[in-house]
Image (spheres, rainbow, N blue to C red):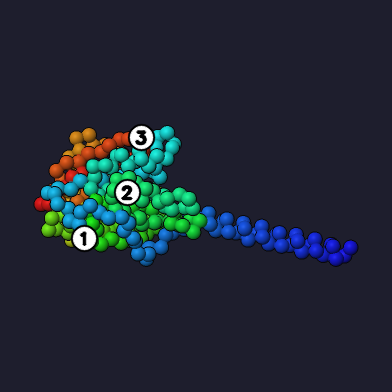
Amino acid sequence: MAKASTKGSWAWLVLAIVVVIGGLAIWQGNRRVPGNPTKALELHGTAEYATFPGDSIRIGTFNIHGGKGDDDKVDLERTAALLDDLDIVALNEVDGDLFMRRNQAGAIADSLDMAWVFAPTERRWWHDHFGNALLTNVGLNSFQQIALPGTQHEGHRNAILATFSLGDQDVRILATHIDRRIDRQVQLAKVIDLFLALRAPAILMGDLNTRPDDPQLTKLLSSPDVVDAGTIDSDLPDRRIDWIIARGLRPVAAGHVDNDASDHPLVWAEFAAE
């Protein structure tokens, strides 16, 4: 009788240990932790052009909201349809690989026959869970991720710095998504410093979560060599937060597309070399 009782006690102890370990694993896996900012990014697919052959190039920035539209459904084909006439596009709020789910940047890029690079800002369930991406029809000469400063346990942020060739010029792109809460100002300052340090021509684009009246942005746009492509959008939203800003390039067209594929508009601009 004593032996049976001892075996029962051991069984309960083993079960308790399994439950505790399982609970810790679930807790650990479910946590949103920063992506690895030193991890080398990978360019997937093949761009159509090594050097862009035209006199001007169309770029865009789009916070895709995880592909979730007004109807609360994820439809990446609907997202991709908005990007069909762009040569380079920055994407924010992109879901990465997770078990049976494919990286959203890869799925969108494949449907458009574009190359792509994904820069994870967060890991979850031991996967690169969430981040920013760059889709391109033009070969990238270089690309890297840059971590942005932050104080929060969630909402980690980064930027993608890449270069491509437009004619005989190398153009630098800084694509990012800035926090909308307490870290916004310090991240915005970091991004502006990075942008101004780049040799022109250079483009800053993404969801800056910053209105036109922000003092840091106002100061940047007052610089004589900086141009806000949105100013030639005939129907420019007053309270926009998605931006395309350039140095050393001339905007020849720009606009935004309100849509049902995201909670953000698609913002685009066409640039020619100065």
Identify residue for label 1: 198
Q: Please tell me how crowded label 2 is: few (under 14), some (14-19), or many (20+) other residues with Cα within 10 Å.
A: many
Identify residue for label 2: 109
| Mark before the other along the chain sequence, 2 or 1 | 2
Marks 2, 3: nearer the viewer: 2
* x and y percentages locating residue 11 in the rendered image: 75, 61
Identify residue for label 3: 260
Image quarter of residue 50: bottom left
Judging from the image, what secondary structure is the residue with disc 1 in? loop
State whether residue 263 is above or below residue 247.
Answer: above
Query: Disc 2 and disc 1: Cα gap in Å?
Result: 27 Å
In this view, the residue farthest toward the right is: 1
State whether residue 164 is above or below residue 244.
Answer: below
* x and y percentages locating residue 203 in the rendered image: 22, 53
| Mark before the other along the chain sequence, 2 or 3 | 2
Q: Are marks 2 and 1 in contact (CB under 8 Å)?
A: no
Name the residue: 17% across, 59% down.
Answer: 170
| Mark before the other along the chain sequence, 1 or 3 | 1
Query: Disc 1 and disc 3: Cα gap in Å?
Result: 35 Å
Query: Disc 2 and disc 3: Cα gap in Å?
Result: 20 Å
Say which of 211 and 14 sits in front: 14
> Can residue 212 be seen from the camera position used here?
no
Q: Are marks 2 and 3 in contact (CB under 8 Å)?
A: no
Q: Considering the image in quadrants, where does the N terminus appear?
A: bottom right
Kind of residue indicated by mark 3 = Asp
Kind of residue indicated by mark 1 = Leu
Name the residue: 12% across, 49% down.
Answer: 55
Judging from the image, what secondary structure is the residue with disc 2 in? helix
Kind of residue indicated by mark 2 = Ala
Name the residue: 48% across, 50% down.
Answer: 100
